[in-house]
Image: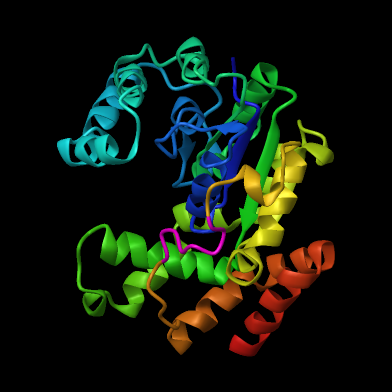
Amino acid sequence: MYPDFLGIGAQKSGTTWLHAMLSQHRDIWLPHLKELHYFDRKFPVNESDGFLNPTPRQGVAGNHLRRRIQRFSLDKLRERLQIHRLSDLGWEFKFIFGAWDDAWYSSLFENHAGRMTGEITPAYSCLGPTAISHIYNLMPHAKLILLLRDPIDRAWSHAKMDLATTRRRNPRSVTEDDYIAHFNSRASRLRGDYLRTINCWLEKYPEDQLFIGFFDQIESEPEILLTRILDFLGVNSSADAIHADPRSAVNAGQKASIPQRLHQHLASLYIDDLQILAQRYEHHPTRWLDKCKNAL
């Protein structure tokens, strides 16, 4: 039983909000652990050059087991015991100690009780043709959800997380050159290359199986965005079907304006993509493009 839908990104674009909303819908089952990272570790992207390894990585189960055990800390266990059912513990042990293959991945979605199933891993936006072909062969009818954010804001949020929050550094100790190096890194550029993501997934999946939403709507009209997503999935979109407040802030990062030099650098990196996105999707990307031009 493979999932009925995948949230494929983009990173720092509202996928935590999406997981929180969908996991509280009565007709949807999601793993309580967001970001399973199955396909991006089965088919890892070499972020130094952006090319996908042509074959699945061999011998990764042991490394993945270590990663899974690290995620299963006592603090997280206590947190989950307070929030989730005890039955979730069985899923946790399967996730940690399973065989780490397609059959294992499929087994993670067995206890759905007739509900629609899905998972959300933003790193899937970085996958290339080999991985996407594999996913399509497993689940050709899966629906895909891609949330996009102004790529300049996304890159800034990503850099702050990597350089300050994750490393527990004082943000003031991060230099502008540190930020620029992060903006230029393949890891950041790949996650902000929305055109590549869309084109790669549409090489296998028909366009009507890909939903594209915008982070801006989470801030301005989350109820409308959530209704559109639920309609796309084909589940009840009435207010009584979901036990969550779409306007609740989930994983909201600290608001901090981008220094002028950094804004200009990011604008130079993304203006060409933004011009294409604005032509293709108009409203929100057009605003992103206008902001980009103002920064130059």
Rendering coords of residue 46 (x, y %): 46, 39
Whether the magenta-drawn stretch holds residue 251 is answered as yes
Could you say which quadrant of the image residue 273 lies in?
Answer: bottom right
Placement of the N terminus among the 4 image quadrants: top right
Q: In this view, does 110 lie to the left or right of 254?
A: right
Q: In this view, does 285 lie to the left or right of 33?
A: right
Could you say which quadrant of the image residue 118 lies in?
Answer: top right
The answer to whether residue 141 is above or below residue 189 is above
Residue depicted at x 34% and y 29%? 85
Rendering coords of residue 271 (x, y %): 67, 73
Residue depicted at x 45% and y 70%? 156
Rendering coords of residue 108 (x, y %): 46, 19
Please state the total of marks drawn on the protein image.
Answer: 0
Chief secondary structure of the magenta portion:
loop
Magenta stretch? 245-252
Q: Is residue 193 left or right of residue 235?
A: left
Whether the magenta-drawn stretch holds residue 25 is answered as no
* Residue 91 seen: yes
* Residue 296 seen: no
